[in-house]
Image (cartoon, rainbow, N blue to C red):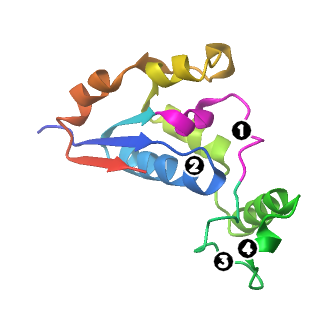
Amino acid sequence: MTTKKMAIIATKGTLDMAYPPFILASTAAALGYEVQIFFTFYGLQLLRKDLSDVMISPLANPAMPMPIPMPVMVQMLPGMESMATMMMKNKLKKHGVASLEELREMCLEMDVKFIACQMTVDLFEFDKKEFIEPVEYGGASMFFGFAGETDICLFV
């Protein structure tokens, strides 16, 4: 019997887009899948040791449910990003959803492999000391070696 495999490409570094790759990866790993997440472009933010500055933006996010309708002009006001982030974190906590740090740690405990896109690390001049361990560094061709053999490949 061969192990099922799942590959995820994480390209976003906002709070609302950080949850899907970690939830999907941890769930697949719990179901026995071999899982890799390829973090590229803004998704690299999710590999930083400190996730406290991962925010959500109500601006240009029309599907984001707000307690009251908010015109775009209000969403642009200073402090709205911080307020939306606080509201989302409170909602996640109220409903018992694990934090990003907890989900990321769960993935690592279940042997989900994290790959940081070396080209993006170089492009944005990231300092690898800012990233958690263990993270592997490689390019798209390295990721394709795994993704080409997967049962499920997701771009989130």
Q: Is residue 95 left or right of residue 32?
A: right
Residue type marked 1: Leu
Give residue 4's position: percent from left, percent from top: 22, 43
Name which residue lies at 75% across and 79% down: 71
Secondary structure beneath dot 3 equals loop
Which mark is first along the chain, 4 or 1?
Answer: 1
State how far apart marks 4 and 2 are (Cα).
24 Å
Q: Which image quarter: residue 43?
A: top right
Identify which amino acid the numbered label 3 is placed on: Pro
| Earlier sequence position, callout 4 versus callout 2 | 2
Labelled pair 2, 3 in contact (Cβ < 8 Å): no
Name the residue type under label 4: Val
Tell me the residue at 21%/40% (across/down). Answer: 150
Q: Earlier in the sequence, mark 3 or mark 1?
A: 1
For mark 4, give the secondary structure: helix
- Measured Cα–Cα span from mark 1 to mark 4: 27 Å
Q: Position of residue 149 (x, y in %)?
A: 17, 35
Question: What range of the chain is rendered magenta?
Answer: 40-55
Q: CA distance from mark 1 to mark 2?
A: 10 Å
- The residue wearing badge 4 is 72
For label 2, the residue is: 18
For disc 3, the marked residue is 65
- Badge 2 amino acid: Ala
Q: Quadrant of residue 146?
A: top left
What is the spatial separation of the Cα atoms under label 3 and label 4, in whole angstroms?
14 Å
